[in-house]
């Protein structure tokens, strides 16, 4: 796989899919971006140019690379010719399972199916495809065009060749891959989601305000972003889905989404993407 001939499809044009498509396009890689929601595709089309400019401004994307074309489509079959498909749809197991079953019937036998799940075990998703050895995890961070280290997850059935092809693509994109083994939440979210949940509990118990929780993590521990601003950036809807996925698979009550988080989601306060979460934007 060399630059220019990577056939890349991204499924899901939300926060992550749009960021990943911007990263690819800004690296000169053509992308097919698929979403069931035409409004999401329109938002992505409006946002991608700005994302690329932001990546260039911060030196994360080269100014001299010509942007790869992005094709926006509501038809999953348009991903059929891709060498690599990155799935970035909602963190709902049943929705992902359906997409994997459909993709599996469409793509070439040797295509690499990559999930950007926050924490559903890769092997569980691999259970829905004809060739489970072609499924790998790539947990991009948000925004994908700015944060250039990717947690790559090797499932127990993942073939070395599939892993190598994903890492080769990440190299073309200028990302560093850190390869880990499979398990609920992998490394980052097994730790981070619990930290966010506990931070929200602390706020609801009246121990500290969201601003003070974050100030402590930044000032005392040197984090660049506090846990609650991170939650707002991820999207509180996604945080609750991720916590549920972890809780269902571990039975650990530390992952049961706390009432404050579920209440914010019920009120439509998802964080940055809706203008209000723990903080106002
Ligand atoms: N938000 C983050 O910071 C973050 C970071 C890393 C990983 N993730 C993971 O990335 C994935 C996407 O998260 P997000 O924050 O971009 O979510 P999002 O809600 O912003 O976007 C999800 C998109 O998927 C689309 N979608 C739903 N079902 C679909 C289908 N069957 N086919 C095509 N599109 C479909 C929706 O219309 C929506 O546009 C999730 O698995 C999430 O856990 C999120």
Image: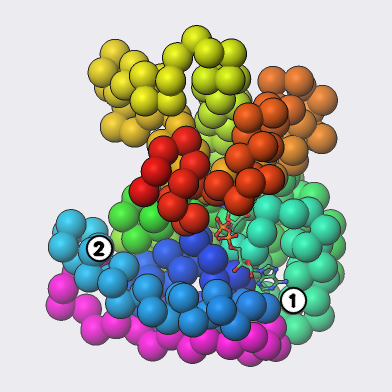
For disc 1, the marked residue is 103
Q: Which secondary structure type mostly characterizes the magenta part of the structure?
A: loop
Direction from residue 270 to residue 146 in the image, left or right = left
Crowding around mark 1 (Cα neighbors within 10 Å: few <14, some 14 to 19, many 20+) is many
The range drawn in magenta is 61-81
> Can residue 91 be spotted in the picture?
yes
Estimate the x, y position of residue 201 in percent, counting from the top left: 60, 20
Instruction: Residue at 45%, 75% (x, y): give it.
Output: 44
Q: Is residue 66 magenta?
A: yes
Estimate the x, y position of residue 67 in percent, counting from the top left: 29, 82
Residue at the far top in the pictured view: 207
Quadrant location, ligand no. 1: bottom right
For disc 2, the marked residue is 55
Location of residue 211 (image quadrant): top left
Question: In this rendering, is residue 272 above or below 173?
Answer: above
Estimate the x, y position of residue 164 in percent, counting from the top left: 52, 60
Instruction: Residue at 61%, 72% (x, y): give it.
Output: 11
Instruction: Residue at 43%, 20% (x, y): give it.
Output: 209
């Amino acid at each position: 796989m060399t630059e220019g001939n990577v056939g890349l499809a991204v499924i899901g044009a939300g926060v992550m899919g749009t960021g990943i498509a911007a990263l690819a396009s800004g690296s000169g890689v053509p992308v097919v971006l698929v979403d069931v929601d035409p409004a999401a595709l329109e938002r992505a089309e409006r946002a991608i140019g700005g994302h690329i400019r932001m990546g260039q401004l911060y030196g994360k994307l080269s100014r001299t690379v010509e942007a790869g074309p992005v094709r926006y489509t509501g038809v999953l079959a348009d991903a059929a010719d891709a060498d690599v498909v990155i799935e970035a749809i909602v963190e709902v197991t049943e929705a992902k399972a359906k997409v994997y079953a459909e993709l599996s019937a469409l793509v070439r036998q040797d295509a690499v199916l990559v999930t950007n799940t926050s924490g559903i075990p890769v092997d569980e998703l691999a259970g829905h495809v004809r060739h489970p050895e072609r499924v790998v995890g790539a947990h991009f961070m948000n925004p994908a065009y700015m944060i250039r280290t990717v947690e790559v997850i090797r499932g127990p059935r993942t073939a070395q060749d599939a892993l190598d092809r994903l890492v080769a693509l990440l190299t073309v994109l200028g990302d560093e891959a850190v390869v880990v083994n499979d398990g609920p939440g992998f490394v980052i979210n097994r730790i981070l989601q619990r930290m966010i949940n506990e931070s929200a509990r602390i706020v609801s118990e009246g121990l500290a305000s969201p601003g003070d929780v974050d100030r402590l993590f930044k000032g005392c521990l040197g984090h660049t972003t506090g846990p609650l601003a991170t939650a707002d950036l991820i999207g509180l809807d996604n945080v609750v889905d991720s916590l549920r996925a972890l809780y269902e698979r571990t039975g650990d009550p530390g992952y049961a989404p706390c009432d404050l988080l579920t209440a914010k989601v019920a009120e439509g306060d998802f964080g940055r993407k809706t203008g209000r979460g723990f903080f106002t934007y």
